[in-house]
Amino acid sequence: MKCKKGVQKWGNLLTKWFLVVKCGNNIYIFELYKQNTSILDIYFFGTFNCKADAKGRIMLPVALRNQVSPILKDGFFIKKSYLSECLELYPAYEWHRVMAELNEKSRFDEENLQFIRMYTAGLRQVEVDSTGRLLIPKDIISLAGISKEVVIAPIGKRLEIWDKKAYDESISATKEEKVKLAKRVMLGEKPSGDVS
């Protein structure tokens, strides 16, 4: 099919892009698809020892920067963990997914509202700057007791940011405790004496 030069046009119709090509008396419309990094399923890996400076800036190691590079432009959300003494760093697309799930809960149920308030307390949007530093607001970094030595550890699609001492304590356990935990989580075994 031969087409004249200069007859291709781009158009945007309600966030969808189309290519319109006129060939002779025929007009062809093609819907275009663009890979959107916000729908990527990125699972982080590796544990990283870092340092935080007095302004709350953490230089991300190159290996971690490579993992987050496809989603840098969308930014991140950070908040205090609901259950642990650390911060949770969510890629923007993953935080939006979490919020969509929370928004399904009835806003007329006081318990739902209280949980959402507590779960999102201190939430901030943050970015990684051009030099690879993550700037965490001081009031947020103090919520987790983070000082200079920092550990960034993956939990699936998000990252946890710990004070190194607290992180080391959180993962320390005897071999027996590790075996019991693995059986409960991975095999669904109940602790002995549990008849529920």
Image (cartoon, rainbow, N blue to C red):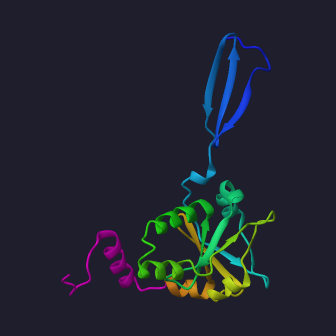
**Residue 86 location (% of width, % of height):** 58, 82
Task: State the residue in front, 155 or 49.
Answer: 155
**Residue 73 location (% of width, % of height):** 71, 57
Task: State the residue in front, 94 or 62.
Answer: 94
Task: State the residue in front, 93 or 68.
Answer: 93
Q: Residue at x 79, y 17 (%)?
A: 5
Name above or below for residue 182 compared with residue 67. Answer: below
In which quadrant of the rendered view does residue 52 lie? Answer: bottom right
Quadrant for the N terminus in the image = top right
**Residue 192 location (% of width, % of height):** 23, 85
Magenta segment includes 184: yes
The magenta span reads 172-196
**Residue 158 location (% of width, % of height):** 56, 67
Q: Visible in this render: residue 66?
A: no
In which quadrant of the rendered view does residue 48 lie? Answer: bottom right
Quadrant for the C terminus in the image = bottom left
Name above or below for residue 72 compared with residue 116. Answer: above
Magenta segment includes 187: yes
Q: Residue at x 35, y 84 (%)?
A: 176
Q: Residue at x 74, y 24 (%)?
A: 8
Q: Visible in this render: residue 107?
A: yes
Work out which residue is located at the far front of the displayed protein and give it.
108
Name above or below for residue 107 compared with residue 5. Answer: below
Q: Residue at x 70, y 59 (%)?
A: 72
Horizontal side, residue 176 vs residue 20: left or right: left
Horizontal side, residue 57 vs residue 97: left or right: right
Name above or below for residue 152 compared with residue 144. Answer: above
